[in-house]
Every structure is written in C-alpha cells, then in structure tokens.
C-alpha cells in the first residue's frame, strides 16, 4: 500500500501537469514569435535529481524491510515442515517429523491469524532447475541442484490452491503441476494418520501385485510394506488418495490410470516413465492392484 501510494502520487502529479500543458498550450501562436528561451535552471535540475533519489531510497528501504521480515521467519513449535523435491517432471513431498511421503499434492493445515503457524518448505532439486510457485500463497522460489532453498506459506483459508513449476526444466515443464490442499487442523491430522498407515492390500489383486513386483516398476516406485522401494518415481503407497496422476496432468480415474501405465506419452509426451509393454491381462491386473493402494 505504501508503494501504491507513492506511485499513485507520482502518476497524479505527472498526469496533472500533462493535462495542464495540453489545455494551456492547445492553441498555436501564429504571430511568428518564439516563446521565451530558457537555457538552464539549477533549481529545476537539483529538484529532478534529488526528489527521485529520495523516492527510490524510500521504496528501497520499504522493500528491504519486507524482505527481511520474510526471510527471518522461523518455525514455531507446532509448525509443519515439509521437504519439497523437484523431479523431471513431478513433485515429491516429505514430512520428516510426521513420517509421510507423498507426491504432487501438498497438504498443509490452515494457519490461525491470531496464532500464526506457517508451513515451512525446504526446496531441493533432484536433477535440474525447477521453481515452486503457488501464486495465491507465495512468490516464486527456485530449486537449484546442490543449493538448498526455502520458503514458507501462511494460508488463512481452507481450499485448493493451484500452482506449477515456473522454471523451464525440460519437455514436460508445462505439465509439472502442483496442488496445495489447505485443510482445517483436524482434517489435516486425519490425513496424516491415514498416510502413515500401511498400504491397504486386497487379496483379489495379488496377481497385479506379483506383476508389479516382478517388473521394473519397483526400480522407480515404492509401496510401503512390500519389496518395492524405488526412489526415482513417486511413492505409490497411498496412490488412490490423490485426485490426480502424472503431476496433475490427468484425473486419477480407472481409465486414465490404465492409460498412464500402458502408454505414459499419451498423457504426458516426453515423460521419463517408460511404457512397460504389458499384455492386456497384466495391464488390467496391475491397474486393479494400484487401485487398492489407498
């Protein structure tokens, strides 16, 4: 508001002078005389040098104060801390103190304005440059390989907030989306409790589990309580608790999930997830198995 007031005052003064000049000198002087010739004014030159300098200094100090307030924020005792890792082309979220690992959909509690409890996010990159940007929650913050960064968000309203990678990171940069679910504290606690439980297994999906665990799927993906312990791709322990797949590129439905397994490029051209060349029977079995992971 301070910056708006300063720039608004500058606009009003300049616009008023412009209107004055247009109104006063709108008629031509055809008597052949030249207007008074002024070849310099020390007072005017000092004024148009000193005043802009003072304005810039004032804006600089205001900006520096806000940046300092943002950067010196430190987690409170009950603040949620998240490690966000950017991959080509998806997001990994780890909650170290809560024992939760998920992907692409970040869950955080609402912060009470009376007793703020911001969520602090440590930003890491697994491969190339990425950028974490949720416009309604915070400014863009870059993820640079081997250079840990951080940001924090302090949402006061529950709801879904959309964002995405804002730094070109390769073929599917435009589809490296992210979703932030801001929940009341009780609802967030229930989500944490459900995410810390072992994957729900169904004996009817044993064939799909066998196929999943005997192919290269387990080299990239993890499912808690099984031999699958990959770290290159998203953790699938609670896959069906997510509303989207492929980093928000498609809704998490049966048909989309089956297509994603069969031919990832059909949903996300340039995806680093390979097509496993499964038979239709194996594809149906794996899809059924993954749909039990809630």
Image (tube, rainbow, N blue to C red):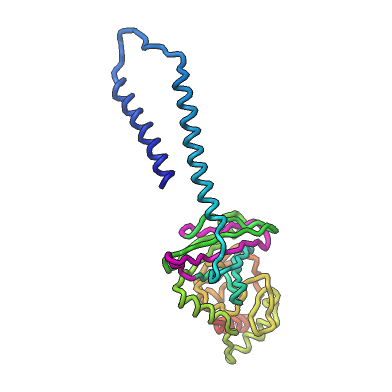
The magenta stretch is: 109-136
Q: Quadrant of the C terminus?
A: bottom right
Q: Within the image, what quadrant is residue 143 found in?
A: bottom right
Residue at 64% of width from left, 82% of height from top? 224
Instruction: Tally the marks.
Output: 0
Residue at image location 30% in from the left, 8% down from the top: 31
Question: x and y percent of residue 195 in the render?
Answer: 56, 79
> Residue 29 occupies which quadrant of the picture?
top left
Q: Judge whether 229 appears above or below 12 on screen.
A: below
Residue 128 drawn above or below residue 214: above
Q: Nearer the viewer, residue 13 or 28?
A: 13
Q: Residue 111 vs residue 125: left or right?
A: left
Identity of the residue drawn at 61% across and 82% down:
286
Query: Percent position (x, y) of residue 60?
Result: 52, 42
Residue 279 visible from this viewpoint: yes
Whole-percent x and y of residue 55?
A: 47, 36
Per the image, is 27 magenta?
no
Q: Nearer the viewer, residue 139 or 168?
A: 139
Whether residue 112 appears in magenta in the rendering, the answer is: yes
Who is closer to the viewer here, 38 or 215? Answer: 38
x and y percent of residue 219 in the render?
70, 75
On the question of residue 284 being in view, the answer is no
Instruction: Check the image and name the residue furthest to the bottom.
Output: 203
**Image quadrant assignment for residue 274:** bottom right
Q: Is residue 172 above or below residue 4?
A: below
């Amino acid at each position: 508001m301070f910056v708006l007031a300063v720039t608004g005052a500058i606009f009003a003064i300049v616009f008023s002078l412009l209107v004055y000049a247009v109104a006063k000198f709108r008629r031509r002087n055809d008597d052949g005389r030249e207007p008074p010739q002024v070849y310099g004014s020390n007072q005017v030159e000092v004024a148009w040098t000193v005043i802009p300098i003072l304005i810039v200094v004032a804006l600089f100090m205001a900006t520096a104060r806000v940046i300092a307030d943002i950067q010196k924020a430190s987690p409170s005792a009950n603040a949620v801390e998240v490690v966000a890792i950017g991959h080509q082309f998806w997001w990994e979220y780890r909650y170290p103190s809560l024992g939760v690992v998920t992907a692409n959909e970040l869950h955080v509690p609402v912060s009470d304005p009376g007793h703020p409890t911001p969520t602090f996010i440590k930003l890491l990159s697994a491969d190339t440059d990425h950028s974490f940007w949720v416009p309604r929650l915070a400014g863009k913050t870059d993820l640079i390989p081997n250079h840990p960064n951080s940001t924090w968000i302090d949402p006061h309203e529950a709801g879904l907030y959309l964002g995405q990678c804002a730094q070109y990171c390769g073929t599917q940069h435009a589809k490296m989306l992210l979703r932030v679910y801001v929940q009341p504290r009780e609802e967030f606690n229930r989500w944490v409790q459900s995410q810390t439980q072992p994957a729900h297994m169904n004996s009817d999906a044993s064939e799909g589990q066998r196929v999943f665990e005997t192919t290269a799927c387990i080299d990239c993906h993890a499912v808690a309580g099984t031999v699958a312990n990959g770290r290159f791709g998203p953790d699938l322990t609670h896959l069906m608790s997510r509303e989207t797949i492929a980093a928000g590129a498609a809704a998490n439905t049966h048909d989309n999930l089956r297509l994603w397994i069969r031919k990832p490029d059909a949903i996300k051209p340039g995806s680093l997830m390979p097509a496993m060349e499964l038979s239709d029977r194996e594809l149906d079995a794996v899809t059924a198995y993954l749909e039990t992971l809630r």
